[in-house]
């Protein structure tokens, strides 16, 4: 393990990629709770005297400050890490992506940069209140559909009756402001009367593109979702179609209705009913994580596979005097006894210790109805199962684990009494992680020795939409697979987005941030393409023996400083936003350097590649490969190469001849024929579109050469190949100064956006030109119409004058006053101009 140094960097971002990122919030460290109480002491781990550690500091939620990182392993090499995984009942959304990608970035840095051996354990919550309800609902709905299936897919009377009852149930439970007798026919009018303003909320925007100036509350989102659910169902009930279409619109009202009627009848011993849904979405979750290049956990734990261990864990907490069973078969954690024994509860967020809303959220179904627990802030370790809920045996009766106990038991089983790092989303600090901490210390501690169960809590900032946390329950989210399928974002661009901001801070995805992502990625794309081109065409012998110029030496000194600065930033609680600025600065310096050797460029490119690979920006690269340059996606498709490279070479030669003093048409025609013949025998169906473009270009070049058309037309043909035919295939030819050939590259977002901006500017320019021409034409028309007027009568139609001379020029105003000399002079001049215009008009008639 390397001993790393600390050096600060303060490079401003606007010098890096020529635009600004949103202001980065600074994480403030607290030393006291909000009620003024001092925080309990944090006991730093100790390692053996021979251990060498980097000077790494981590922002620790336990102390709300940056603490020196010291693993509990005496050798200082092994790091134990437990990450709270997802509750799997729907597809993962971008908020999950932010959490797990940020976690993955830090894990990779710990492993591939600092050299720690990380044992990474993650749980899957495959049973909880939400999963139970959702699984039971889907089971009952599937049974209902099976019972009411019809060969002709016609909606029967019984299905219609149940759906109408479900509609009334939805109105009563979710939209109580509507009249209880609201029917599908009267629904729209009832909504307009009861929710005039709320019903007109803007549509739930995509989480990535939502406007920041729209203030929407949680209640607004829930109301909007409930109205839309009822509206869809009303449409189906008013005009029933085939069963599949009918159910597509009424599923969301049937699910809770059928559960209210029959949920208690579901067999609690048939765990398959409850696990089928979570198993499906667990599979889809890991597909999403693989698509985002998130490393798989070293060990995966599922709640339903650890129930016996969880029961034993609870038994010991009760035996230690920190838990108690109630007569209904539930078990609660006794916070009062825990604190009386000298422990501190709610160390992560002491200011939320007595927040009833957060406590209720942590208790789930047990927060509803009358509770038998002894204290308002006591929380469940074991929940007695109600009818229709899955159950497992325990000393207290059939039931299921509480939410918080699962992680304490599984993490302790996998990693023992002390964990180095515990991670999760920022919303898990209280009550989930505070309760985990209390349970685990109640389990592992003895009267003579209090154990600090986790040494470093790290919490990832949330992805927010219009100020609200992205949430499944609020339906204000976009799933990961939807975002990747629509191709507005890629796994790389999402990761760049999260790297550009501090991992512990929340992110509001704005247009400004999206532009920063596109700019940073495009800048690195261009640098890697240039470096790969240099690598391909450089002479290895010349490169190794070439004497370094002063420019080379200066750039290499800049590289060495960048290495130190990156090390400092990563030691500063994984400050990736600073590293991204440093990398961009280094690329800028390389682009500005004049006369540097190929080897210097390659050296820079390989080091930058190593850092971006450690960050997980390329799933196809091994971080230990020192010779790799760039990331995947820099090359055109393999099947395109046999045709696109010859097309580019032919185009280069045609452009060279077209720009010369005398065009050698014979040589151009001959080269076009040779290119066609060399590629005509290649056969590959997947290459057909590329082959057609090449052959058409060769044909067009030969035709123009045979006709000896002006050189300008040859250049137009070359531009057409670049800007139309290849562009439509996702390929771009980047022209460079002679004697360098055009750089063959795939399109990226920066190129596409640059062309879009150019097109917009061109459109605006053309529109402005048309408007100017229209104004000019209108003015000319007015002058022509005015020229038709005889100067003898031009002033007589005005009420401003009362007397005129023999030419019709006014001499007195309307009041009979003689006009002043100056005014008279102006009128004469105007009359003379009109006389001239009128005579010119007469001459055209």
Image (cartoon, grey):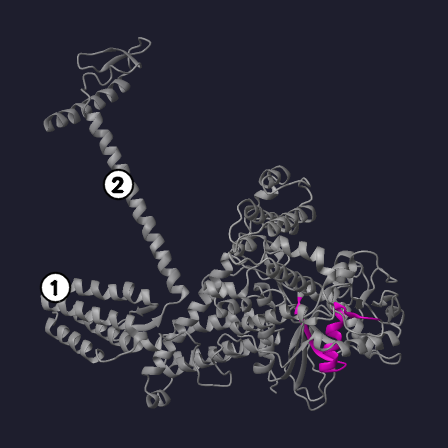
Quarter-of-image position of residue 115: bottom right
Q: Is residue 54 left or right of residue 779?
A: right
Is 289 colored magenta in this rendering? no
Crowd band around label 1 with a 10 angstrom C-alpha radius: few (<14), some (14–19), many (20+):
few
Query: Can the viewer see residue 828 in this picture?
Result: yes
Q: Quadrant of the N terminus?
A: bottom right
Tell which of 714 and 584 is nearer to you: 714
Query: Can the viewer see residue 453 in this picture?
Result: no
Q: Is residue 307 left or right of residue 187?
A: right
Q: Is residue 180 left or right of residue 592?
A: right
Say if 626 sits above or below 327 in the image.
Answer: below
Task: Name the residue at 17% across, 78% down.
Answer: 674
Callout 2 secondary element: helix
Task: Name the residue at 39% across, 60% down.
Answer: 753
CA separation, marks 1 and 2?
Answer: 34 Å
Measured from the top left, where is residue 824 in percent x and y? 25, 18
Tell which of 621 and 517 is nearer to you: 621
Label ID, residue 709? 1
Q: Which residue is mark 2?
A: 773
Q: Quadrant of the C terminus?
A: top left
Bounds of the magenta segment: 397-425
Say if 332 sits above or below 441 in the image.
Answer: above
Quarter-of-image position of residue 431: bottom right
């Amino acid at each position: 393990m390397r001993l790393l140094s600390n050096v600060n960097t303060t490079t401003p971002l606007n010098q890096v990629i020529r635009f600004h990122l949103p202001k980065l919030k600074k994480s403030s460290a607290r030393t006291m709770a909000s009620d003024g109480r001092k925080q309990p002491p944090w006991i730093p781990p100790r390692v053996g005297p021979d251990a060498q550690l980097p000077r790494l500091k981590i922002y620790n939620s336990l102390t709300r400050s940056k603490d020196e990182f010291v693993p509990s392993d005496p050798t200082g090499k092994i790091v134990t890490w437990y990450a709270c995984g997802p509750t799997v009942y729907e597809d993962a959304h971008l908020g999950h992506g932010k959490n797990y990608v940020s976690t993955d970035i830090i894990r990779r840095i710990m492993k591939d940069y600092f050299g720690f051996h990380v044992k990474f354990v993650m749980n899957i919550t495959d049973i909880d209140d939400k999963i139970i309800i959702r699984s039971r609902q889907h089971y009952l709905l599937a049974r209902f559909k099976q019972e009411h299936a019809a060969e002709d897919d016609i909606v029967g009377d019984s299905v219609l009756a149940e759906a109408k009852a479900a509609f009334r149930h939805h109105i009563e439970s979710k939209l109580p402001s509507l009249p209880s007798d609201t029917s599908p026919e009267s629904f729209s009018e009832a909504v307009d009367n009861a929710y005039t303003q709320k019903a007109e909320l803007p549509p739930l925007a995509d989480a990535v593109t939502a406007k920041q100036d729209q203030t929407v509350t949680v209640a607004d989102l829930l109301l909007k979702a409930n109205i839309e659910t009822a509206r869809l169902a009303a449409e189906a009930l008013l005009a029933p179609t085939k069963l599949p279409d009918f159910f597509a619109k009424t599923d969301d009202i049937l699910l809770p209705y059928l559960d209210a009627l029959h949920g208690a009848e579901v067999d609690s011993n048939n765990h398959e009913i409850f696990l089928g849904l979570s198993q499906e979405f667990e599979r889809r979750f890991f597909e999403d994580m693989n698509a985002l290049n998130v490393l798989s956990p070293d060990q995966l734990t599922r709640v339903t596979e650890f129930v016996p261990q969880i029961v034993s864990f609870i038994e010991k907490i009760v035996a230690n005097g920190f838990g108690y069973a109630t007569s209904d078969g539930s078990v609660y954690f006794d916070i009062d006894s825990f604190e009386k024994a000298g422990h501190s509860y709610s160390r992560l967020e002491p200011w939320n210790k007595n927040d009833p809303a957060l406590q209720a959220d942590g208790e789930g179904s047990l927060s509803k109805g009358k509770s038998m627990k002894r204290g308002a802030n006591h929380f469940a370790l074991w929940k007695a199962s109600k009818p229709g809920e899955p159950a497992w045996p325990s000393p207290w009766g059939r039931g299921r684990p509480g939410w918080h106990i699962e992680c304490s038991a599984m993490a302790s089983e996998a990693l023992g009494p002390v964990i180095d790092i515990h991670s999760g989303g920022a919303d898990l600090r209280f009550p989930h992680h505070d309760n985990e901490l209390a349970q685990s210390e109640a389990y592992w501690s003895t009267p003579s020795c209090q154990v600090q169960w986790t040494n470093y809590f790290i919490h990832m900032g949330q992805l927010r939409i219009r100020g609200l946390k992205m949430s499944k329950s609020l339906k204000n989210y976009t799933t990961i697979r939807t975002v990747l399928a629509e191709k507005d974002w890629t796994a790389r661009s999402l990761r760049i987005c999260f790297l550009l901001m501090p991992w512990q801070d929340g992110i509001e995805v704005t247009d400004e941030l999206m532009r920063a992502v596109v700019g940073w990625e495009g800048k690195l794309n261009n640098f890697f393409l240039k470096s790969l081109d240099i690598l391909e065409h450089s002479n290895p012998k010349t490169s190794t023996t070439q004497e370094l110029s002063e420019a080379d030496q200066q750039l290499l000194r800049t590289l060495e400083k960048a290495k130190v600065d990156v090390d400092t930033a990563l030691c500063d609680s994984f400050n990736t936003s600073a590293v991204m600025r440093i990398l961009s600065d280094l690329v800028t310096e390389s682009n500005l350097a004049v006369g540097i050797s190929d080897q210097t460029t390659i050296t820079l490119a390989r080091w930058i590649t190593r850092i971006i690979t450690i960050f997980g920006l390329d799933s196809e690269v091994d971080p230990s490969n020192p010779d790799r340059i760039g990331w995947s996606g820099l090359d055109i498709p393999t099947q395109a190469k046999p045709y696109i490279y010859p097309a580019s070479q032919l185009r280069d030669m045609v452009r060279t001849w077209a720009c010369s003093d005398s065009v050698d048409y014979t040589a151009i025609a001959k080269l076009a024929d040779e290119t066609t013949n060399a590629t005509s025998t290649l056969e590959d169906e997947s290459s057909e579109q590329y082959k057609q473009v090449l052959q058409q270009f060769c044909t067009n070049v030969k035709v123009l050469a045979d006709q000896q058309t002006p050189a300008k037309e040859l250049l137009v043909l070359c531009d057409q190949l670049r800007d139309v035919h290849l562009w439509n295939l996702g390929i771009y030819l980047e022209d460079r100064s002679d004697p360098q050939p055009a750089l063959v590259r795939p399109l990226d977002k920066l190129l596409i956006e640059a062309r879009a901006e150019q097109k917009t500017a061109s459109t605006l320019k053309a529109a402005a030109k048309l408007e100017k021409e229209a104004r000019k034409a209108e003015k000319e028309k007015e002058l022509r119409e005015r020229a038709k007027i005889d100067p003898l009568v031009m002033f007589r139609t005005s009420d401003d004058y009362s007397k005129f001379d023999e030419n019709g020029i006014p001499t007195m105003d309307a009041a009979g006053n003689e006009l002043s000399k100056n005014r008279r002079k102006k009128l004469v001049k105007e009359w003379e101009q009109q006389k001239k215009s009128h005579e010119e008009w007469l001459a055209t008639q």
